[in-house]
Image: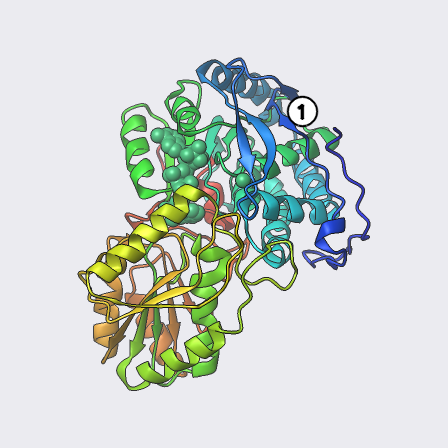
Amino acid sequence: MSQRLKTKTKPKLDFGTAWDYSPAPDSTPIEIASKYKLFINGKFVAAKSRQSFDSINPATDEVLAKVSQANAADVDDAVNAARKALPAWKKLPASERAKYLFRIARRLQERAREFSILETMDGGKPIKESRDFDIPEAAKHFFYYAGWADKLEYASPGQVGKPVGVCGQIIPWNFPLLMAAWKIAPALACGNTVVLKPAETTSLTALRLAEIFQEVGLPDGVVNIITGDGRTGAALAEHKGISKLAFTGSTAVGKQLAKVTAGTGKKLSLELGGKSANIIFADASIDQAVEGIISAIYFNQGHVCCAGSRLFVQESVYEEVLEKLEIRLRSLRIGDPLDKNTDIGAVNSPEQLKTINAYIAQAKKEGAKCHQLKRKLPSKGNWCVPTWFSGVQPAHTIAREEVFGPVLAVMSFRTPEEAIQRANNSAYGLAAGVWTDKGGKILEIASKLEAGVVWCNTYNQFDASSPFGGYKESGFGREGGRQGLLEYLDFGGAR
Ligand code: NAP
Ligand code: MG
């Protein structure tokens, strides 16, 4: 079956604007190939392993496609293709490299509708999120780094970096295309070549991105996409032919990869988990803060590394915030992710649902009070209603460990000092939110929070020009912005 798709709705030309999602879900004219091959050296090729696995729609349990399982020999082919492509790609005038990135960005915009639907079907997220966030943001990253390709001398003033070489990139399933863009765009802008491994449950948009690479004539081997499970990722990480490993995923796997790459000379960046604090002061606009709490934890079913999963509310407004939160949550729509009015889609996989449910059970067992929206859920697929716990103690598992689902731990505090101390009392340090009416308080608190990103009176705002990354067990290295380039340039140890 052809992988191409005719878009019925003419894409708007303005940068990053969403198209109008008008057709009814059942008339959605998207075609998905029944079997996907690996993308190596500019071509879709059968896996040497001859093995495949199913990519499943988590909202319906339907098998969308068979995806190839790359083994060590396939990984070897992909790395060799990237090595072969490297000399010509890095010698290409930077302005020419930029043109490829611009073309990729434009094609992504033009095919945005198709990519959004596929992302939603494969991963379970609401179509309004893929349409308004994932796909436009992915395109923006290619535009942004296209602009940098011929200005790299400004990435690290006073020093000229060289491309690192072949980059192995491993990404998770929560923002599949966007994570691919975060990784591929800066790597290519800097003159590197890439082997990317998407997550097992959400490989389809990365493979479709490979079609765009073919469409724009990206030289063979500059980007290779190998699908598979953790074994494929491990083979890539261990491969001697890569000079850099960029990993986004769990802290547990990140720690393993730090060991695997130690002493090999490979450059490493780790974007790992989080347990981010969202702090609401009594002087905040409470209605606005309630919207922020919801977006912080329930966006993408809570499958967000920087999710505001620990909510700290100042004691005097604690009851008011919880009351308003519950009322507002009642208006959320849960169900068919392809329905443009859906707010909460499907949990990405049965395994992740099991993990989430185990955390909910554990929190109850440890004595926290469970609140859940009462909803009739679809009979098929993986579903979890928005859940929040009150009566949470700092020692409770729900206050410490990442759930990666729509589960919020609510706690109260009295003073700003206590809020800072409790927010920082975490193994993680990815993000934080601060809600207050007082500008001076924002700066003071933000400067004391151990978090890579601090949002003030908002949450989950991203921009290609803003660096993103963590402290502590949330990893190291930054993605996005000028800092994102530094991960893909070699300064000969001088930086
Ligand atoms: P994961 O289990 O660590 O998997 C991430 C990727 O690594 C997947 O492609 C996975 O393949 C692969 N992998 C698994 N075992 C591996 C191994 N031993 N060696 C090499 N690769 C291996 O994480 P996840 O469950 O997909 O994603 C959720 C986690 O990612 C959360 O902790 C979240 O906070 C974090 N995350 C962080 C950021 C950030 O920017 N800081 C952004 C998004 C997500 P399979 O899919 O086949 O298992
Ligand atoms: Mg899937």
| Depth order, front residue of 242/490 | 242
Is residue 338 in sight in this rendering?
A: yes
Report x, y in % for residue 7.
Answer: 79, 46
Q: Is residue 478 left or right of residue 138?
A: left
Q: Residue furthest left?
A: 395
Colour mapping used in the image: rainbow
- Which of the 4 quarters of the picture holds residue 243? top left
| Depth order, front residue of 476/354 | 354
Residue pointed to by mark 1: 219
- Which of the 4 quarters of the picture holds residue 34? top right
Q: Secondary structure at mark 1?
A: loop
Q: Residue at x 46, y 47 (%)?
A: 479
Which image quarter is the C terminus in? top left
Report x, y in % for residue 81.
Answer: 56, 17
Which image quarter is the N terminus in? top right
Report x, y in % for residue 175.
Answer: 52, 47
| Depth order, front residue of 284/408 | 408
Q: Residue at x 72, y 28 (%)?
A: 217
Q: Residue at x 68, y 29 (%)?
A: 218
The amino acid type of the residue labelled 1 equals Pro
Rendered-image quarter of ligand 2? top right
Report x, y in % for residue 73.
Answer: 47, 13
Q: Is mark 1 within 8 Å of ligand 1?
A: no
Q: Is residue 174 left or right of residue 30?
A: left
Is residue 490 in sight in this rendering?
A: no
Q: Residue at x 40, y 56 (%)?
A: 306
